[in-house]
Every structure is written in C-alpha cells, then in structure tokens.
Image (tube, rainbow, N blue to C red):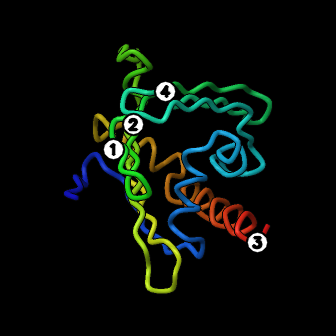
Amino acid sequence: MDLDPDTDLSFTRNLKAPRGLIWECWTTPAHILHFFIPEPHQVTDCDIDLRVGGRFNTTFNVEGDEMSNRGVFLEIVPERKLVFTDTYTEGWKPAPDPFLTSILILEDDAGGGTRYTAIARHRSPETRKQHEDMGFFDGWGIVADQLDAYALGLARG
C-alpha cells in the first residue's frame, strides 16, 4: 500500500494472538469495549454493522467527558483488512468535520501470531500533524498492546 508521508501515519507490530482472533476482536462490539482506547479511558458503547456502508459507532469516556464517534466501513476483507472512516456516517451522510480513515491490515506471522499494520489517513498535512502530536504512535501502540493481551486472554479462556 502506498503511503503519503504528508497525510498518513502508520505503524506495524507483531502480535502474539492469531489473526482470526484479532479480527474477531475488531469486529465484535463486546470485544471493542476492552481495547479500543488507551486505558484508563474507556469505550462505553460500540455499535457495528459489519458491511460496506455499515456503521462503526463508538462512544468513549475520556476523563469524565463523553465523546461520540460515528463512522462507516469502506472495505472489509475477512480476517485480512478492515477500512473505516468518520468522513461519513451510516447512509453515506457526510460528517461535518471528518478526521481520519483507518486501515487495519492483518497478516500471519511466522510464529503463529499476527503482523498488525495500522494506518491513519488524514485529509490534510495539518490534521496528520495534529494526530501525531496527540500521540498517534503511543496511543495506537497502547491499543495494539491492549488488543493483544485481551485476545490472548480469550484464547486461553
């Protein structure tokens, strides 16, 4: 995938959990609640309609403030790729102030885990810089760690 350094942020990490389980966590609302935002912040609600054009809505509690994100899925390749955006809401209604499109790429790694790539595409260099300054690498890294720990706990359960 071609990345634009002016508007895209990306990182890749090898997770210990298998690809199928990582996919399940990313596509099941009950699982999203456990990893999708860095602790101690919380996801308090998640509503997923897993189809192109289907909703991917989340609500966060960040230091007592409720934040609502509404979006849709743009591409779904089961157990391999998930693309969602806040540029539109369900019904292809344009959002007033979109921030990003997220691309998750999942591949098997040699050790039975998952090669996990997260890409955040922004509409401008300014929003890319804003996201990086907000802590993209640390925050999305924490989310990847939380996801891996949570998924491994499911695998053992």
Query: Of helix, strand and loop, which one carries label 2?
Result: strand
Give the mark nearer the N terminus: 1 vs 3. 1
Q: Which residue is mark 1?
A: 121
Marks 1 and 3 in Cβ contact (< 8 Å): no
Assess whether mark 4 and mark 1 are in contact (beta carbons under 8 angstroms). no
- Which of discs 1 and 3 lies nearer the camera? The answer is 3
The residue wearing badge 4 is: 55
- Local SS, label 1: strand
* Residue 47 point in image, percent of width and height: 61, 29
Kind of residue at badge 3: Arg
Instruction: Determine whether 90 is above or below 1 in the image.
Output: above
Given the image, on which type of amino acid does mark 4 rest?
A: Arg
On the image, numbered disc 2 is attached to which residue? Answer: 100
Relative to the observer, which residue lies in front, 130 or 148? 148
Tell me the element at label 4: loop
Asked if residue 135 lies left or right of residue 43, the reply is: left
What kind of residue is marked 2? Leu
Along the polypeptide, which appears first: circle 1 or circle 4? 4
- Determine which residue is flagged by label 3: 156
Q: Earlier in the sequence, mark 3 or mark 2?
A: 2
Q: CA distance from mark 4 to mark 2?
A: 15 Å
Using the rendered view, name the quadrant where residue 123 is placed: top left
**Residue at 63% across, 59% down:** 147
Residue 142 vs residue 29, the one in the foreground? 29
Classify 10 Å Cα crowding around label 4: few (below 14), some (14-19), many (20 and above): many
